[in-house]
């Protein structure tokens, strides 16, 4: 038997009187107010970690919670016969269970129904283990209703989402890398009832792949079990997506990024080196930097900010705005305002309010990178000024005329997001942009959209404001350090 009390932050357990009745099960007896001070040094189980409370016998309740152990999580259960206190006056077990569930789910809703896409090939084949050992136990403990779909081919999740009965589910969890979230949002986009589908379903990621930018940026962790807990307990928010189209009017959605130049070459162009892991990307970047490889192009933008001071002002003004919630979407939410098919993305015509970037920079481009999330991978804080729903795309352009030392120094500062302050790097926010590659005939290169290979051709992208329903810890992105820099 152990003693316990209800605290303002959770349940405090007196581990000195701990007795296990079976693995993962602990009994907790009721105590009087005279024992409360003694328990102040006990083990605190925060309300956030409590995922379910059941009515027990007589005046007891059964509390299930998540415990972090090293790099994994474990599910524990305590049976508590709790006496009244200043925090909880109820002594009836049913009323107490309801009260504890309300405290545990103050910022979220329990007992959801979800589709889980599991890509067994993600994470160098470890995705299945990550899911069954860490993610699934948390979802089961939280009494989630789960339909598990093992993806068997590229585009499987897109096909599934296009035809899925959305009325059966509250959301989608991608137990994968960043490829499956890309497929999911595009499957929703291809539906005839896309507005209703995006309004109803949240989309989030349990990090089980090699690239887990969505989980790191939105949930603040690369630990699959902790990510599952954040999904269960996080705030539902509305985030922006980007619509990317070619001159033929074919469009797709992007939740993460688009890139052309050194980063795209290092990512997609080194697929044959996947066996060396993350090092393949670093090797690819190093080769292009030291050979001063350039990627001539033309870039047109519809600006929101003009310089880094305006970038800082934009971020500061919108950082503390309350997160967007479940606002109903309509067909107009997905209209592309800047796409004009009859002009074929030529160089002689731009939509109203657009301008071309300096040709001296774009003729000698090293890196073109646009995105919506701060962290594009572990230790790569590429867009520290990104905000979830500010109606903008973050754009970063590296001038290829910079000396090798300056470029290398900028790339070595990606983990802290300090690269954007370098003088040879432009970082602006835009509503939309047009990229026209100008490579020599026969030269092979890549455009990456959410890490997926895309044809090297003129593309145009614009923001779709607040169309993605997702889950974020505290209702915002993981802290990037940008606010500390501009205070």
Image (spheres, rainbow, N blue to C red):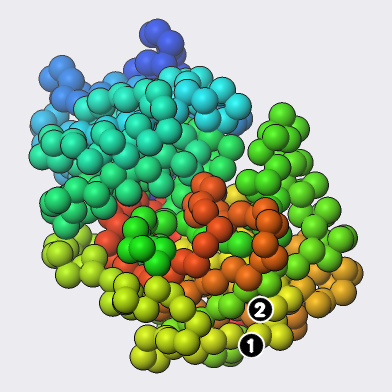
Question: How many C-alpha atoms fall within 10 Å of the one at disc 2: few (<14), some, or many (≥20)?
Answer: many
Residue placed at 40% from the left, 23% from the top?
152
Q: Nearer the viewer, residue 178 or 319?
A: 178
The x, y position of residue 324, in whole percent, is 27, 67
Q: Quadrant of the C terminus?
A: bottom right
Q: Is residue 155 visible?
A: yes
Circles 1 and 2: CB atoms closer than 8 Å: yes
Residue 328: numbered disc: none
Q: Is residue 423 left or right of residue 466?
A: right
Residue 403 falls in which quadrant of the image? bottom right
Residue 349 falls in which quadrant of the image? bottom left
Q: Is residue 412 left or right of residue 199?
A: right
- For mark 2, what is the residue? 362
Q: Nearer the viewer, residue 272 or 380?
A: 272
Residue placed at 80% from the left, 58% from the top?
288
- For mark 1, what is the residue? 358
Q: Residue furthest top?
A: 22
Q: Is residue 3 visible?
A: no
**Cα distance between the residues tagged 1 and 2:** 6 Å
The x, y position of residue 431, in whole percent, is 40, 78
Q: Secondary structure at mark 1?
A: loop
The x, y position of residue 325, in whole percent, is 24, 63
Residue placed at 25% from the left, 39% from the top?
161
Q: Quadrant of the N terminus?
A: top left
Residue placed at 63% from the left, 70% from the top?
438
Q: Secondary structure at mark 2?
A: helix
Q: Nearer the viewer, residue 281 or 391?
A: 281
Question: How many C-alpha atoms fall within 10 Å of the one at disc 1: few (<14), some, or many (≥20)?
Answer: few
Asked if 215 appears above or below 306 in the picture, the reply is above
Q: Is residue 476 left or right of residue 292?
A: left
């Amino acid at each position: 038997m152990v003693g316990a009390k209800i605290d303002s932050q959770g349940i405090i357990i007196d581990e000195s009187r701990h007795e296990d009745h079976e693995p993962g099960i602990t009994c907790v007896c009721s105590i009087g107010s005279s024992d409360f001070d003694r328990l102040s040094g006990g083990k605190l189980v925060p309300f956030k970690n409590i995922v379910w409370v059941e009515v027990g016998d007589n005046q007891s309740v059964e509390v299930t919670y998540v415990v972090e152990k090293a790099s994994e999580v474990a599910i524990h259960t305590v049976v508590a016969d709790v006496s009244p206190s200043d925090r909880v006056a109820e002594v009836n077990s049913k009323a107490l269970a309801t009260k504890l569930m309300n405290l545990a789910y103050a910022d979220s809703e329990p007992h959801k129904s979800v589709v889980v896409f599991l890509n067994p090939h993600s994470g160098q084949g470890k995705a299945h283990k990550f899911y069954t050992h860490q993610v699934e136990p948390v979802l089961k403990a939280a009494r989630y209703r789960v339909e598990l779909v093992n993806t068997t081919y590229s585009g499987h999740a897109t096909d599934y989402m296009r035809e899925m009965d959305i009325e059966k589910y509250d959301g989608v969890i991608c137990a994968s890398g960043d490829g499956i979230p890309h497929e999911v949002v595009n499957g929703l986009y291809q539906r005839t009832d896309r507005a209703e589908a995006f309004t109803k379903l949240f989309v989030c990621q349990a990090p089980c792949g090699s690239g887990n930018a969505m989980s790191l940026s939105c949930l603040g962790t690369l630990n699959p079990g902790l990510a599952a807990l954040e999904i269960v307990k996080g705030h539902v928010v509305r985030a922006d997506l980007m619509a990317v189209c070619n001159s033929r009017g074919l469009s797709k959605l992007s939740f993460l990024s688009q890139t052309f130049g050194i980063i795209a070459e290092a990512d997609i162009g080194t697929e044959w080196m996947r066996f060396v892991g993350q090092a393949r990307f670093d090797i690819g970047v190093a080769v292009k930097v030291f050979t001063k490889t350039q990627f001539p192009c033309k870039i047109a933008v519809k600006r929101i900010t003009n310089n880094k001071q305006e970038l800082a002002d934009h971020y500061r003004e919108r950082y503390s705005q309350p997160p967007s919630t479940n606002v109903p979407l309509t067909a107009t939410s997905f209209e592309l305002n800047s796409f004009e098919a009859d002009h074929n993305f030529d160089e002689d015509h731009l939509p109203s309010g657009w301008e071309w970037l300096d040709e001296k920079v774009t003729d000698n481009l090293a890196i073109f990178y646009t995105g919506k999330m701060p962290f594009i991978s572990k230790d790569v804080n590429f867009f520290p000024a990104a905000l979830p729903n500010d109606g903008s795309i973050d754009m970063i352009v590296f001038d290829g005329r910079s000396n090798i030392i300056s470029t290398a120094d900028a790339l070595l500062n990606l983990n802290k997001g300090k690269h954007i302050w370098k003088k040879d790097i432009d970082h602006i926010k835009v509503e939309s942009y047009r990229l026209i590659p100008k490579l020599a005939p026969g030269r092979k290169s890549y455009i990456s959209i959410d890490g997926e290979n895309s044809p090297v051709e003129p593309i145009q992208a614009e923001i779709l404001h607040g169309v993605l329903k997702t889950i974020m810890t505290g209702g915002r992105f993981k802290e990037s350090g940008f606010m500390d820099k501009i205070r």
